[in-house]
Each structure stands twice: as C-alpha cells, then as structure tokens.
Image: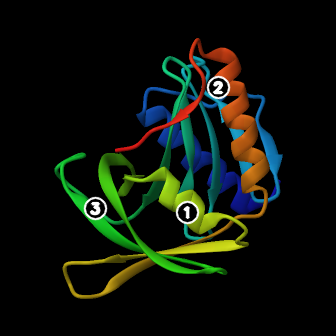
Amino acid sequence: MNAGLIVRIALLTCMAMTSRHALAENEQVFGEWMVSMTDDRDALFAATFNDSGAIFGKWCTVADGKCVWLLGMNVSCTAKGENAHPTLVNTTKGATTLQVRCGGPISGGTYRYVFSSWQELESALDGSERVGFAFPLDSGKFEVVRFSLNGMQQACNLAEKATAKLSSTSTKNEQL
C-alpha cells in the first residue's frame, strides 16, 4: 500500500474518531476521493486529502439527512462556530471569497472549518479540476491548501444518495 495513502487513512481515522466515529471497512474510492460510513452508521462522508495531510470533503449525518462541507487543516481556530473567517477560493474556473466557521480541533494540531454557504462553494467547484483555499493569518501571511477534485462529483453523489436512503428525511445541504 502507498505510504501516502496510509498516512491519509490514518488522518481520516483520527478525524472520524475525534468525532466519536470510526471508519467502516467498506469505503469506495473515486479518483482522489473516497466515500465511507462511520462504524456507528451515524454519518457518511466523501473526502480527499492533499500531500500535507489537510482534508476537504462533504460530511452527511444520517439522523437528519443534512450535509456540510468541511475543511481540516493546521490553522488553529477558537470560538467554535461563532466567528466567520474569510477564505479565498481559487479553482481552474476563477476565484471567489467564502466564509467558514470554526468547527473545533480534530487532532494533532488539525482544526475543522465548516463552509457557511454550500451553494456558493459548490458553484465555485462546479466543473473545476482543482481547488485552493487561502486563509489570512494573524501574522499577515496566508496559509494555502490545495486539493484535487478528481472523483469529487461521484463521491459526493454516492454519499448523498446513501445518506438519503438511510435517513428518514431527504438529504439536505446545511446552510450556516
């Protein structure tokens, strides 16, 4: 097995476990994206990793059928969910600014960010091959993370359909 893939699976496992979830054995891979369900069957996710270990993906909870877009990276945040943080989103189609909210620490210095508008994010991602996110830091510098979108559409479609099938409500994207 590729050493990079082992690191990525370990990171995703840590992320899932800190959310009181563990990865299920039956994950599916689409290009650079994977889809899996938590062992407790509370959530499904479609996600990808970059070379620095950051994670980007869509997380769907079975109980309410809602999905949110998450970004996990090594930029700390406090005041969970209270303050919106701007991020520059750059794709092969162009650039835009979106808002994210702190979702709290994941593990090992990684923090979770939740996108405030799934519609704006999905519009920016539509038809693009890659995405980059630039976050302004207190130092006046930027933290930049990039991800491949190869396989994203298939992975997200499967996660949403499987969540809707398991949920008593239809799958909805969450607007924060």
Tag 2 or tag 1, which sits nearer the N-term?
1
Q: Amino acid at mark 3?
A: Ser
Observer-side mark, 1 or 2, equals: 2
- Which residue lies under the disc numbered 2? 163
- Which residue lies under the disc numbered 3? 76
As helix, strand or loop, the secondary structure at mark 3 comes to: loop
Q: On the rendered structure, is 5 left or right of 19?
A: right
Q: Amino acid at mark 1?
A: Gly
Q: Is residue 63 above or below residue 38?
A: above
Q: Residues within 10 Å of mark 3 (few under 14, many from 20)?
A: some
Distance in Å between CA atoms under marks 2 and 3 = 30 Å
Q: Residue at x 65, y 47 (%)?
A: 9
Which of the image's four quarters has the C terminus?
A: top left
- Which residue lies under the disc numbered 1? 53
Front one among 101 and 41 = 101
Distance in Å between CA atoms under marks 3 and 1 = 15 Å
Tag 3 or tag 2, which sits nearer the N-term?
3
Residue 5 is situated, as x and y percent measured from the top left of the image, at 72, 56
Q: Residue at x 60, y 47 (%)?
A: 10
Q: Amino acid at mark 2?
A: Thr
Q: Residues within 10 Å of mark 2 (few under 14, many from 20)?
A: many
> Is mark 3 in CB contact (under 8 Å) with mark 1?
no
Tag 1 or tag 3, which sits nearer the N-term?
1
Q: Residue 123: which quarter of the image?
A: bottom right
Q: Residue at x 58, y 58 (%)?
A: 122
As helix, strand or loop, the secondary structure at mark 2 comes to: helix
Front one among 75 and 109 = 75
